[in-house]
Image: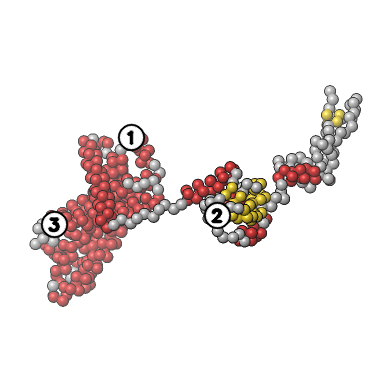
């Protein structure tokens, strides 16, 4: 058995490393590699045989051959000639990124020296044209083909690609503003669409509520309790603060006018009727609409963005039973409790202001209150609170379900939900005021 070992000497570092472009070349300072030869002791020693120079040419010969193929000396130039058809701009050389970067200033001077007017262009003698060179010419042509231009099929395809890209980037035509009547019609159409979807959601809620009443086991009790806690218990602090300040302000301003006529004791009638019948329910509803209504819309909107609503539909989980029903019932239960809480804190703040401004004691204030304000006003206020809570939840769920799967639609839906909820609450309060105008007064 013959052992084979490498007899070639250790190569020194070459001035030009091997690369896929140049291949394996031998520089002047690199010795000729030798073939493998038998190890000492073998009966047929073979002398080192260098590679044939015709197989591995000298480096200078290789570079000269490569340069002749690529024609690296063909710099980009343009020439203006005059023919029978008119002036013609003829382009020569390499119109590539590397060549243009080396002769940028010279080409700019040549381009600036071209005469204005209709020029013919001949690019058929260009040895190579890449995207950078085509883009430079396309910009000089003001992004359109000259009337007379000679191109090769490859060049034509490149310029057609640039033209197609420019057409895709063109801004859409400006939309014409609608006249006032058209805008009014579009607004009414959008309003009708919202009313239709709102009535549909309310009908679905009634159907789901009937199913829950018939089968209480299927009711989403966990979701209801969680929504009652988040919409009711967590809102006690902010409602107490706002109600206390409103009671102080209302009592202070009323006291300034009552002192002029010597009717200080009527502060109980004014403050009690205003807070229990109107301010308590409306103030609580506005705070809940801004706090809980926006949270409901944002929650459903995020579920739309993250495709959770689509996943629930695929798993045959009804949105109305699991998402809408718990929120509507929770706000319908929590709102009357918040109204009662708001009434107590607002009356307490008003009583303190009346004590220091009019000298009316707290005991006299709360003793006179039941006689000054009939109990019917309390029931009206609590009933209004429950209705307001249902309306806020339905509006919030309506806009949450309409959110599109993008963040901009989520923000717009949340804003519209809060504004619409407050508007609906004020409109419903006006309807209650008309319906119960002869109840609890006098």
- Would residue 331 be seen by someone viewing this image from the given angle? no
Viewed as shown, does residue 389 lie left or right of 121? Answer: left
In three-dimensional space, the C-alpha distance between marks 3 and 2, rounded to whole angstroms, equals 73 Å
Spot occupied by residue 397 in the image (x, y as percentages of width and height): 29, 47
Specify the quadrant of the image occupied by residue 264: bottom left
* Image mark count: 3
In three-dimensional space, the C-alpha distance between marks 1 and 2, rounded to whole angstroms, equals 60 Å
Residue at the bottom extreme? Answer: 260
**Quarter occupied by the N terminus:** top right
Residue at the front extreme? Answer: 84
Q: Which mark is residue 20?
A: none
Q: Which residue is mark 3?
A: 434
Viewed as shown, does residue 245 lie left or right of 373? Answer: right
Viewed as shown, does residue 45 lie left or right of 233? Answer: right
Residue drawn 61% across and 59% down?
A: 114
Query: Pointers 1 and 3 in contact (CB under 8 A)?
Result: no
In three-dimensional space, the C-alpha distance between marks 1 and 3, rounded to whole angstroms, equals 44 Å
Spot occupied by residue 345 in the image (x, y as percentages of width and height): 24, 61
Specify the quadrant of the image occupied by residue 284: bottom left
- Tag nearer the camera, 3 or 2: 2
Which secondary structure, mark 1?
loop
Viewed as shown, does residue 365 lie left or right of 137? Answer: left
Q: Which mark is residue 141?
A: 2
Residue drawn 27% across and 50% down?
A: 190
Spot occupied by residue 318 in the image (x, y as percentages of width and height): 30, 38
- Tag nearer the camera, 1 or 2: 2
Mark 3 crowd level (few <14, some 14–19, many ≥20, 10 Å Cα): few
- The mark that comes first in sequence, 1 or 3, is 1
- The mark that comes first in sequence, 3 or 2, is 2
Specify the quadrant of the image occupied by residue 324: top left
Q: Which residue is mark 1?
A: 316
């Amino acid at each position: 058995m013959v052992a084979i070992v490498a007899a070639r000497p250790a190569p020194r570092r070459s001035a030009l490393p091997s690369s896929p472009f140049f291949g394996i070349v031998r520089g002047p300072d690199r010795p000729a590699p030798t073939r493998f030869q038998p190890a000492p002791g073998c009966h047929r020693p073979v002398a080192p045989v260098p590679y044939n120079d015709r197989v591995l040419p000298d480096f200078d010969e290789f570079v000269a051959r490569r340069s002749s193929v690529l024609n690296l000396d063909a710099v980009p130039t343009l020439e203006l000639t005059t023919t029978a058809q008119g002036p013609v701009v003829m382009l020569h050389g390499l119109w590539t990124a590397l060549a243009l970067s080396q002769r940028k200033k010279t080409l700019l001077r040549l381009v600036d020296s071209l005469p204005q007017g209709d020029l013919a262009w001949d690019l058929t003698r260009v040895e190579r044209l890449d995207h950078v060179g085509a883009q430079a010419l396309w910009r000089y042509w003001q992004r359109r083909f000259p009337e007379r231009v000679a191109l090769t099929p490859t060049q034509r395809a490149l310029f057609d690609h640039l033209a197609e890209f420019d057409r895709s980037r063109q801004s859409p035509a400006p939309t014409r503003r609608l006249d006032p009547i058209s805008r009014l019609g579009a607004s009414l159409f959008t309003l009708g669409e919202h009313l239709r979807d709102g009535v549909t959601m309310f009908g679905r809620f009634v159907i789901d509520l009937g199913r829950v009443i018939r089968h209480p086991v299927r009711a989403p009790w966990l979701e209801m309790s969680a929504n009652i806690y988040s919409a009711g218990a967590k809102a006690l602090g902010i409602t107490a603060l706002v109600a206390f300040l409103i009671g102080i302000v209302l009592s202070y301003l009323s006291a300034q006018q009552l002192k002029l006529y010597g009717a200080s004791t009527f502060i109980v009638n004014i403050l009690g009727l205003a807070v229990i019948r109107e301010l308590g329910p409306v103030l609580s509803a506005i705070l809940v609409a801004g706090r809980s209504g926006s949270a409901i819309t944002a929650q459903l909107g995020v579920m739309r963005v993250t495709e959770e609503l689509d996943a629930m539909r695929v798993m045959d989980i009804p949105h109305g039973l699991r998402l809408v029903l718990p929120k509507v019932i929770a706000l319908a239960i929590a709102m009357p409790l918040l109204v009662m809480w708001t009434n107590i804190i607002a009356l307490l703040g008003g009583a303190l202001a009346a004590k220091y401004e009019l000298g009316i004691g707290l005991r006299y204030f709360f003793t006179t209150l039941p006689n000054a304000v009939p109990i019917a006003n309390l029931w009206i206020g609590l009933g209004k609170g429950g209705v307001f809570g249902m309306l806020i939840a339905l509006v919030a769920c309506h806009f949450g379900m309409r959110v599109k799967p993008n963040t901009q639609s989520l923000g717009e839906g949340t804003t519209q939900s809060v504004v619409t909820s407050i508007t609906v609450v004020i409109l419903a309060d006006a309807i209650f005021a008309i319906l119960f105008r002869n109840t609890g007064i006098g």
